[in-house]
Image: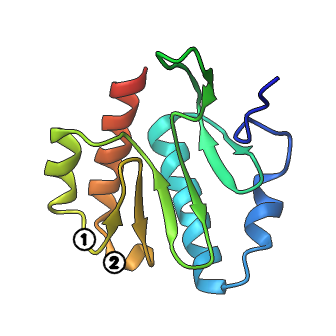
Amino acid sequence: MYEPKMKETDNSVIEFIEKVESEKKKADAYQLLEIFEEVTGYDAKMWGPSIIGFGSYHYKYASGHEGDAPLVGFSPRKAKISLYLAYESEEREKLLASFGKHTKSKACIYVNKLADIDKNVLKDLIKHTLETYQ
């Protein structure tokens, strides 16, 4: 039977952040933790080995594959910080226009450091995602 890689665990979010090698990225992770908890109202949980997620929702694809995922989340990865927010949408694109320095894929937004972005726009992106998936 299929076992999803990304599922909520009991691992400590703080212990995970403390293992981040870069002190700047670690500081950014603590700031993101505060922002995400403030905006979502959810406590942070580890999803899989490296994603800090907030809240959850159930998805089901046409193929029958289904599972749970965090509503929003982030991961302070070695190269960049990955932000897990709403998939491509007109609203997301509008918000990203004034977000600051970033790259993106269909599901993720990548930033080098928090100093590169507008934190108020990040809060709006989080709110947009919550409205989309709740």
Circle 1 residues within 10 Å: few <14, some 14–19, many ≥20: some
Question: Residue 102: x and y, percent?
Answer: 32, 70
Question: Residue 91: x and y, percent?
Answer: 18, 40
Q: Amino acid at mark 1?
A: Gly
Task: Name the one closer to the observer, 124 or 133.
Answer: 133
Q: Residue at x 23, y 45 (%)?
A: 92
Task: Name the one closer to the observer, 40 or 128.
Answer: 128
Task: Answer left or right for 108 relative to 120.
Answer: right
- Residue 116: image tag: 2
Task: Give residue 132's quadrant in the image.
Answer: top left
Q: Amino acid at mark 2?
A: Asp
Q: Sequence-wise, which precedes: disc 2 or disc 1?
A: 1
Q: Which residue is tagged 1?
A: 100
Circle 2 residues within 10 Å: few <14, some 14–19, many ≥20: few
Q: Examine the rendered structure and indicate whether residue 77 appears above or below residue 72.
A: below
Secondary element type, mark 1: loop
Task: Answer left or right for 85 relative to 29.
Answer: left
Q: Are marks 2 and 1 in contact (CB under 8 Å)?
A: yes
Question: Residue 56: x and y, percent?
Answer: 59, 27
| Image quadrant in which the C terminus is located | top left
Task: Name the one closer to the observer, 2 or 107.
Answer: 2
Task: Answer left or right for 115 relative to 94.
Answer: right
Task: Give residue 4's quadrant in the image.
Answer: top right
Q: Residue at x 59, y 31 (%)?
A: 55
